[in-house]
Amino acid sequence: MLILGIDTSCDDTSASVINGRKILSNIVSSQISFHRKYGGVVPEIASRKHIEWIWNVTEQALNEAKANFKDIELIAVCHGPGLIGSLLVGLCFAKALSYASQKPLVAVNHLEGHILSIFLEEEPEFPFISLIVSGGHTSLYRVDDFGKYKELGRTRDDAAGEAFDKIAKMLGLGYPGGPIIDSLAKKGNPEKFNLPRPYLHKSFDFSFSGLKTAVKLLIKNLGYEEGSLDEDIKKDIAAAFQSAVVDVLIEKIKWATEFENIKTVVITGGVAANSELRERCLKLKEEGLNVYLPSKALCTDNAAMIAVAGYERYLRGEKSDLFVNAKAYLPL
Ligand code: KG4
Ligand code: ZN
């Protein structure tokens, strides 16, 4: 069964064709160069770029998959959560395709897409603990089956990826900060500066804004202006910050597996591409947990994850009508 997936939830215009759970194409057209000079995503620019690109990106996905649109049997599209203007572009495009071709449409929650992205490559057994750790979300779920998600905790302020991006901005490193901090941290000493680990004892919630303030104060106390630090100091702060975030994520995963008595863990979302987090997951495996991480390209936003989540919903009898709306806030 050929499925066309579409995701325009933030600043990536993405379309994918999958056959069952097998990826035939997964085009992600990044708008980063248009947002970089503003140090973050500008919603108005993002939606305009989606309008300009969505047609070409979809054609590219069909061409790369060597598929003809008439052979597509299902259209899956992300309808939230995300930037409302961005979401509307993908959703209206998908609705128009569905209406004109009379092909079924399934609207997908972006978070479900992240959780199920692992099924494009592997087949973890239910139940599992899922950590979504991205630019917009940091949430822990207990997943009992496709469509059965129980939220255990979430961030009370910034998402982990957002914290990476903000710290990178303070260090004058550019946008998006996650991958830059990741590579810089490899050359730094994580023990040079002692940053707090916000564990929020007895809670599965997260909080990263205090860590952000701690870095701000550290920069000030060291006598630097934000954005103009010595190269060596940048590396050490990047390493200290990253290890603080990774410590918290790993510790919460362990608590959740113990509390729920579940040994399988799936970690997805942009920050799951982080090398230190991935290395620490190997240690979790040695400690007896079955840890699943998608390959890096499937951690960050992409339409294949929307396609597979839509496919699983369709298999269970779900279809969306043309009244389905985009939602900036859409819990699972
Ligand atoms: O999942 P994603 O593409 O979009 C959202 O749904 O938010 O995640 C993007 C986030 C950004 O904050 C980016 O800085 C972060 O993921 N990120 C990373 C890495 N690669 C991307 N954070 C840490 N280390 C990385 N290697
Ligand atoms: Zn995402």
Image (cartoon, grey):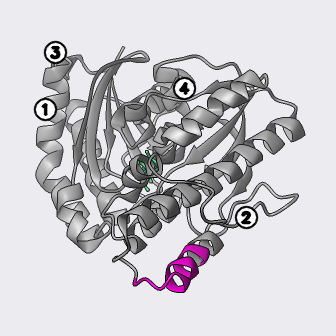
Q: Which SS class for mark 1?
A: helix
Q: Which of marks 4 and 3 precedes in the sequence?
A: 3
Residue drawn at point x = 36 percent, y = 47 percent: 322
Reading the image, the residue beneath label 4 is 317
Q: Which of marks 1 and 2 precedes in the sequence?
A: 1
- The amino acid at mark 4 is Gly
Residue 198 is tagged as: 2
C-beta proximity under 8 Å, tags 1 and 3: no
- The amino acid at mark 3 is Lys
Of the residues tagged 3 and 2, which is closer to the observer?
2
- The amino acid at mark 2 is Pro
Q: Residues within 10 Å of mark 2 (few under 14, many from 20)?
A: some
What separation in Å lies between label 3 and label 2 (alpha carbons)?
A: 49 Å
- Find the magenta span and give its range: 214-225
- The amino acid at mark 1 is Glu
Of the residues tagged 2 and 1, which is closer to the observer?
2
Q: Residues within 10 Å of mark 3 (few under 14, many from 20)?
A: few
> Residue 157, image x and y in percent?
61, 70
What separation in Å lies between label 4 and label 2 (alpha carbons)?
A: 42 Å
What separation in Å lies between label 2 and label 1 (alpha carbons)?
A: 45 Å
